[in-house]
Image: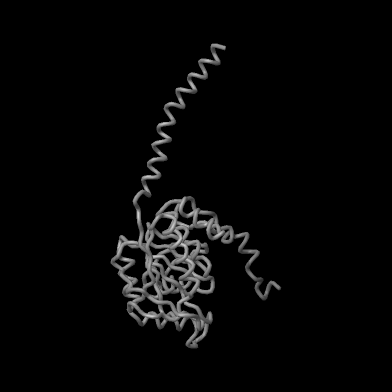
Amino acid sequence: MKKFLGWLLSFALVLSLIAPAASAQTSENKDAFKDKSVHVQVVLFDGFDLMDALAPYEVFAAAGMYSGGAVTLELVSAEGKRSVPSGMNGPSLEAQAALDPNRPGIILVPGAAGKPAGNSEDAIPNILGQAMKTGLPDLLKQAVDNKEVTVATVCGGSLLLAMKGLLKDRYAVTNHMGMAALKAAGAIPVDARVVEDGPRLVSGGGVTSGLDVALYLVDRELGPRIANAVEKLFEYERRGTVWKAEGVTPIDFRTSQETSKIEQPAAASEK
């Protein structure tokens, strides 16, 4: 009995030492997000993809609602306040202001909506090419160079940055149909849902990845409780691991000699 009481007292002593530390850690976690706010600019350009822009917009808007206004956002364009037509003959959205690359926060760049390939006016390569002729690329360069701005892209939005040379030797993702173009423009394409290259560049893959990009940024900036509240509101759970160039590098078994022998077609003389 004495041994049991001694053990119980020792256990109670350990708990008394651990509890304050755990409480302090919890308090520190809360304080990390206390009084934090973030401003989001969602970029519009002629032919932009509606879902690329509006899915993240709704996530950030809901985060602002649940956080009591810690997130503010606006639709912007390189030209300033104007009506901006979306792609595929979709509706126009009103840009509320000019894109400001000097304002701290998040700048989200959507892709284009149209035919995946070809030279027609409504083909995505042409839409992105027309956007490159505007003042948008220079503004995006200023944003990428600004240490107080996180530039996030959805789908073909990363191609706009790459075409300006802003993703040279940087990890990124885009729609699977644009990965070769991303690589050709100097980026390092990563087959992942969301890719973060440093804290100030986040890219998403296909069109629906805009939800995941925005939820990740909400989690990162305001914490998991706000992100979870938005997920429950939307009845959607964030998909995929956010890929970063960190941790142990996985073995690529596809490059092993054994796999190469299996995958390589036989030479004509061997058939």
Residue lying at the far left in this picture: please name it. 102
Residue sitting nearer the eye, 119 or 112: 112
Residue plotted at (35% across, 75% down): 137
Residue plotted at (52% across, 64% down): 191
- Give above or below for 9 relative to 232: above
> What is the x, y in percent for residue 100?
31, 70
Looking at the rendering, which quadrant does residue 236 occupy?
A: bottom right
Residue lying at the far bottom in this picture: please name it. 120
Camera sees residue 119: yes
Q: Is residue 45 left or right of residue 256?
A: left
The colour scheme used to paint the residues is one colour
Residue plotted at (69% across, 72% down): 270
Residue sitting nearer the eye, 78 or 202: 78
Quadrant of the rendering where the C terminus is positioned: bottom right
> What is the x, y in percent for residue 215?
47, 59
Total marks in image: 0
> What is the x, y in percent for residue 141?
32, 71
Residue lying at the far top in this picture: please name it. 2
Looking at the rendering, which quadrant does residue 43 occupy?
A: bottom left
> What is the x, y in percent for residue 200?
37, 60
Quadrant of the rendering where the N terminus is positioned: top right
Residue plotted at (48% across, 20% down): 10
Residue sitting nearer the eye, 229 or 32: 229
